[in-house]
Amino acid sequence: MDIRDFGTQLVRTQDLDPVYSGLYHAKLPKPQLERALIAYWSFYSLGFAAYASEAEGDEFWERMFTAAVNETPSPLGGRWAGATER
């Protein structure tokens, strides 16, 4: 089985992290889905990924940078979300 078939089977059976099933079923426009995945992979926070993915172009990368630097409080106050392993 090649990698694409394997990935298709994971999505079909939903035998993967529930975040990926949720994003798949959200039916986001492809550019927004791509931004959400990049943000999720970077910060391991679906909330942040949703927030960041709503921005396009330079604004998306500014949100990513702001969260990475983590000096400015998040829109919810306090530190930006992100799992310790990231």
Image (cartoon, rainbow, N blue to C red):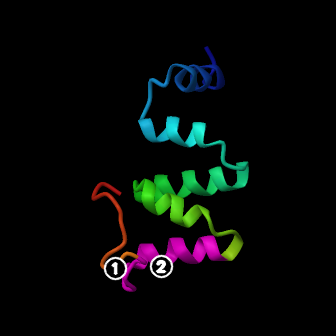
- Relative to the observer, which residue lies in front, 86 or 9? 9
* Image position, residue 81 (x, y; %): 35, 65
Distance, label 2 to label 1, CA atoms, is 13 Å
Pointer 1: residues within 10 angstroms few (<14), some, or many (20+)?
Answer: few
- The residue identified by callout 1 is 77
Provide the secondary structure element on which disc 2 rests: helix
- The residue identified by callout 2 is 66
Pointer 2: residues within 10 angstroms few (<14), some, or many (20+)?
Answer: some
Considering the whole magenta stretch, tell me its main secondary structure: helix
Q: Amino acid at mark 2?
A: Thr
Quarter of the picture containing the C terminus is bottom left
Q: Is residue 47 above or below residue 6?
A: below
* Image position, residue 31 (x, y; %): 71, 54
Q: Residue at x 48, y 54 (%)?
A: 40
Q: Is residue 51 left or right of residue 33?
A: left
**Magenta residues (range):** 59-75
In the picture as drawn, the residue positioned furthest to the bottom comes out as 72
Quarter of the picture containing the N terminus is top right
Q: Is residue 71 left or right of residue 38?
A: left
Q: Residue at x 62, y 24 (%)?
A: 8
